[in-house]
Image: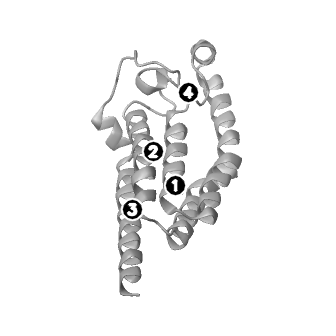
């Protein structure tokens, strides 16, 4: 149930965050790099994963078992910073902290059933969420797989949301200049 609600809930939260946001140039400059790293992490993961057909263990999957969710957490943190609004930040971060741990555990149980031996070894070597602190990993990426996983929707949403925050910031600055 929680897993099915996370995407529609995400759209509702995004709309509320964009409405509540009070972005400034500074909040955008501080939050944007965090969100960009999150989007990049997600993109790199989407260019590898072939859901339920093979166990992804290369590229960013060699750093964390959940690079899509780690990237999503950075996206949420980056947008929380960019929003410059405490309620918007809570709306972004609290549902993430409540929903995704359960989702990760369910997905791991599913992978353990699909790939019992391989997943056991992978689980012993790679952390669940926070990436291994190393710069020595072999990048692996397929643009065709990225497209197949429709990760471009995240990139488009990212660009649209950042654009709206920038416009909101400019309008806020313009209103201050008029006063």
> Could you give the CA–CA distance between mark 1 and mark 2, rounded to whole angstroms?
9 Å
Point out the tag, 3 or 2, that comes first from the N-terminus: 3
Point out the tag, 1 or 2, that comes first from the N-terminus: 2
Foreground mark, 4 or 2?
2
Residue designated by label 2:
34
Residue designated by label 4:
65
Q: Are marks 1 and 2 in contact (CB under 8 Å)?
A: yes
Mark 3 Cα shell of 10 Å, populated few (<14), some (14-19), many (≥20): few
Residue 133 sits above or below residue 174 on the image: above
Foreground mark, 4 or 1?
1
Point out the tag, 4 or 1, that comes first from the N-terminus: 4
> Could you give the CA–CA distance between mark 4 and mark 1, rounded to whole angstroms?
26 Å
Residue 36 sits above or below residue 45 on the image: below
Q: Residue at x 48, y 25 (%)?
A: 61
> Could you give the CA–CA distance between mark 4 and mark 3, rounded to whole angstroms?
35 Å
Residue 30 image offset from top left, x and y in percent: 44, 50
């Amino acid at each position: 149930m929680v897993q099915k609600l996370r995407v529609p809930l995400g759209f509702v939260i995004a709309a509320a965050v964009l409405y509540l946001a009070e972005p400034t140039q500074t909040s955008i400059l501080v939050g944007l790099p965090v969100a960009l790293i999150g989007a990049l992490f997600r993109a790199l993961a989407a260019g590898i994963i072939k859901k339920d057909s093979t166990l992804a263990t290369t590229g960013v999957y060699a750093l964390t078992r959940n690079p899509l969710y780690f990237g999503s957490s950075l996206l949420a943190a980056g947008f929380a910073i960019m929003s410059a609004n405490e309620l918007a930040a809570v709306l972004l971060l609290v549902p993430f902290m409540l929903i995704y741990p359960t989702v990760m555990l369910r997905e791991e149980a599913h992978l353990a059933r699909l790939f019992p031996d391989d997943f056991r070894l992978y689980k012993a070597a790679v952390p669940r969420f926070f990436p291994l602190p190393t710069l020595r990993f072999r990048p692996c990426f397929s643009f065709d797989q990225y497209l197949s996983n429709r990760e471009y929707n995240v990139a488009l949403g990212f660009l649209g949301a950042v654009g709206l925050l920038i416009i909101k910031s400019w309008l806020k600055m313009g209103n201050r200049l008029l006063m």
